[in-house]
Image: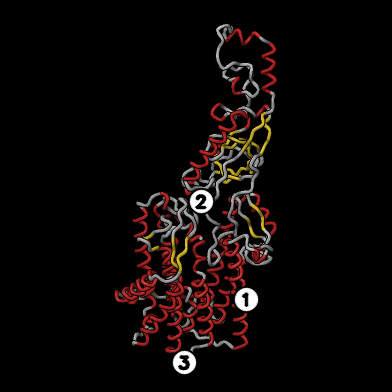
């Protein structure tokens, strides 16, 4: 690991991004992985700089008075030199030694304190911070330009006032020219559509840490998660599931793959694609891209759900056997996995020719890592957005259909005239969750999935395989492992579910309202911490209770989904355990990102809101 050159708190010179000018900065911190220094300029702006863009103060010491390279015309107050040579003027060498008083003037002038007028270039970052619908990232912020003084004056001592010719500080009579140059420089940088952190530094992925354990980690995830999913489903189908018998016996290949089942899955996928293309629902703009463009999205997910319900009802009315989904559940899971893998391969091939502006901030340039995380940010076929479509349509709506099939299977296998109370609770709770997501579909456009991560195996597998076949795990478990729930216990579980839902929905609604219109009079009571980026961090309301109140609500709801299954086995609680691990990972990633982005303001925020997800847990 390379050693750092500058220490925290050291005062040095830092190059202003997009220019060749160096200004006095203070070292705040150093990232050993990216080798970037977080520095603070005198106007309060905090940026990340490479070590090559930082110089010690000693490298800017003023030259000695005897240096022949010093140009008197660059010194303020040096009016004795004429702009044209007089024929009667003695040679330069004689002039240099002719007047001792002139030498004294020069020496006095070198001691003069230079007054520098610093008007730094400030660009408005594109977009808000990210906040996943299910609580993924980030902090709730306010758009706007950073608060700064239009003119900040400070003095440079004699020791540090010298700047090389290409970085020379102009006297006041050239101030108009300086403003013109700064204005042109600002326009050039702004047209590139990048923030200050990315200006003239190349893609951010070159210095960003890889998540999920890097290339080895994502490789193991792509191999391990599908296998683990099938082992869980096989274990759940056993009459007496036991972790001591793990792994369960594997079925024959015909029991895992059938071409007809794959055709059924394709039919469902393309039916959802047809509903997505219907010209119903309002069209909204997404978050600004790095080039300033805003993609358009049609919000018709809720209508797609209603049409899907009508289609399933019509199929059952005309004699379709809905229990076909239960009898071929493992085959459907494998069909979904095969489709997700094929889709990921297509996305990787098409992303190879994508322009740099179309690449996701999370992409790295490594083929294996980008196959997992996704290389292209918004892959589209015409106006059909593949990532946005897969996020809420085939998997999420399919989850509700799977739950309905499990309810019918329970009645069939257990010879019940009506479904059990436990099955009704699981179906109702999860139906409410899906409807909430579809009704608030626009909130998806600000999540990390849409704005940061590319579309690769991670999202394809998660949306098309993991959601419909793991999130429905409680209903699948109850088919062969019934559990009778008393009405008093059911009342407590319902109260717990509603408590989690109120926290989840109110926290997300407050966050989305603040992002949409920070100046709304209804939000005037909320307290914030201003950051050097120009955005504010909420420190009151739901977001002053814990740092991630939506995560807390999500965890409470996940527990309510599992409680109707009883306590005979840990399998129904797999989702709660998995989700807790997932949210802790998200919180840690959010913490690293915000500490780097907001610097000292984030430390103040942590002091104001010390609890992370659960109260009294730091």
At horizontal 60% and vertical 32% (from top left) the residue drawn is: 175
Q: Position of residue 394 (x, y in %)?
A: 41, 71
The residue nearer to you, when weighing 57 against 415, is 57
The residue nearer to you, when weighing 358 against 496, is 358
At horizontal 42% and vertical 50% (from top left) the residue drawn is: 357
**Vertical placement of residue 472 versus 584, above or below:** below
**For the residue labelled by badge 1, is the local secondary structure a helix, a strand or a loop?**
helix
Residue 499 circle label: 1
**Separation of residues labelled 3 and 1 (CA atoms):** 31 Å
**Separation of residues labelled 1 and 2 (CA atoms):** 37 Å
**Separation of residues labelled 3 and 2 (CA atoms):** 54 Å
At horizontal 41% and vertical 53% (from top left) the residue drawn is: 358
**Vertical placement of residue 227 versus 108, above or below:** below
Q: Which residue is mark 3?
A: 416
Q: Quadrant of the C terminus?
A: bottom right
**Going by the image, does 426 lie left or right of 618?**
left
Residue 209 circle label: 2
**For the residue labelled by badge 2, is the local secondary structure a helix, a strand or a loop?**
loop
First-in-chain label (1 vs 2): 2
């Amino acid at each position: 690991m390379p050693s750092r050159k500058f220490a925290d708190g050291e005062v040095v010179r830092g190059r202003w991004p997009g220019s060749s000018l160096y200004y006095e900065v203070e070292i705040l911190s150093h990232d050993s992985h990216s080798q970037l220094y977080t520095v603070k300029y005198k106007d309060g702006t905090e940026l990340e700089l490479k070590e090559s863009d930082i110089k010690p103060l000693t490298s800017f010491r003023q030259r000695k008075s005897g240096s022949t390279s010093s140009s008197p015309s660059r010194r303020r107050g040096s009016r004795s030199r004429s702009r044209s040579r007089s024929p009667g003027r003695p040679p330069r060498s004689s002039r240099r030694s002719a007047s001792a008083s002139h030498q004294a003037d020069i020496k006095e002038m070198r001691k003069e304190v230079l007054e520098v007028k610093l008007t730094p270039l400030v660009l408005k970052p594109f977009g808000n911070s990210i906040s996943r619908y299910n609580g993924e990232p980030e902090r709730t912020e306010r758009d706007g330009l950073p608060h700064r003084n239009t003119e900040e004056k400070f003095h440079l001592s004699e020791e540090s006032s010298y700047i090389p010719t290409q970085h020379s500080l102009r006297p006041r009579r050239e101030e108009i020219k300086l403003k013109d140059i700064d204005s042109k420089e600002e326009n050039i940088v702004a047209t590139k559509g990048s923030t200050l952190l990315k200006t003239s530094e190349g893609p951010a992925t070159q210095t960003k840490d890889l998540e999920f354990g890097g290339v080895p980690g994502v490789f193991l995830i792509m191999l391990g998660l599908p296998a683990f999913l099938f082992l869980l489903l096989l274990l759940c189908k056993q009459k007496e599931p036991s972790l001591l018998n793990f792994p369960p016996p594997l079925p024959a290949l015909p029991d895992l793959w059938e071409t007809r089942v794959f055709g059924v899955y394709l039919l469902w996928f393309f039916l959802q694609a047809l509903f997505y293309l219907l010209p119903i629902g309002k069209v909204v703009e997404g978050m600004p891209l790095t080039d300033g463009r805003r993609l358009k999205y049609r919000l018709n997910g809720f209508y797609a759900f209603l049409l899907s319900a009508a289609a399933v009802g019509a199929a059952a009315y005309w004699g379709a056997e809905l229990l076909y989904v239960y009898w071929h559940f493992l085959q459907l899971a494998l069909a979904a996995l095969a489709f997700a893998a094929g889709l990921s391969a297509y996305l990787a091939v098409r992303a190879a020719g994508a322009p740099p502006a179309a690449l996701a901030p999370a992409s790295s340039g490594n083929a294996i890592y980008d196959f997992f995380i996704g290389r292209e940010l918004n892959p589209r076929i015409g106006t059909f957005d593949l990532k946005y479509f897969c996020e809420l349509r085939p998997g999420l709506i399919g989850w509700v259909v799977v739950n309905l099939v499990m309810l019918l299977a329970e009645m069939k296998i257990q010879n019940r005239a009506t479904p059990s109370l436990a099955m009704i609770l699981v179906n109702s709770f999860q139906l409410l969750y899906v409807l909430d997501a579809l009704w608030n579909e626009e909130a998806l456009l600000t999540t990390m999935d849409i704005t940061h991560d590319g579309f690769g195996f991670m999202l394809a597998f998660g949306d098309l395989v993991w959601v419909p076949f793991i999130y429905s795990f409680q209903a699948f478990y109850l088919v062969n492992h019934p559990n009778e729930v008393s009405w008093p216990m059911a009342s407590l579980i319902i109260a717990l579910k509603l408590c989690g839902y109120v926290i989840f929905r109110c926290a997300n609604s407050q966050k989305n309202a603040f992002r949409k219109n920070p100046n709304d009079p209804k939000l005037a009571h909320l307290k914030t911490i201003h950051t050097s980026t120009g955005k504010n961090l909420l420190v009151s309301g739901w977001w002053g209770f814990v740092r991630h109140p939506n995560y807390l609500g999500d965890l409470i709801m996940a527990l309510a989904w599992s409680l109707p299954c009883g306590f005979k086995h840990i399998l129904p609680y797999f989702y709660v355990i998995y989700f807790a691990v997932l949210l802790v990972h998200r919180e840690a990633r959010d913490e690293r990102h915000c500490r780097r982005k907001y610097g000292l303001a984030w430390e103040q925020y942590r002091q104001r809101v010390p609890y992370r997800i659960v109260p009294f847990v730091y």
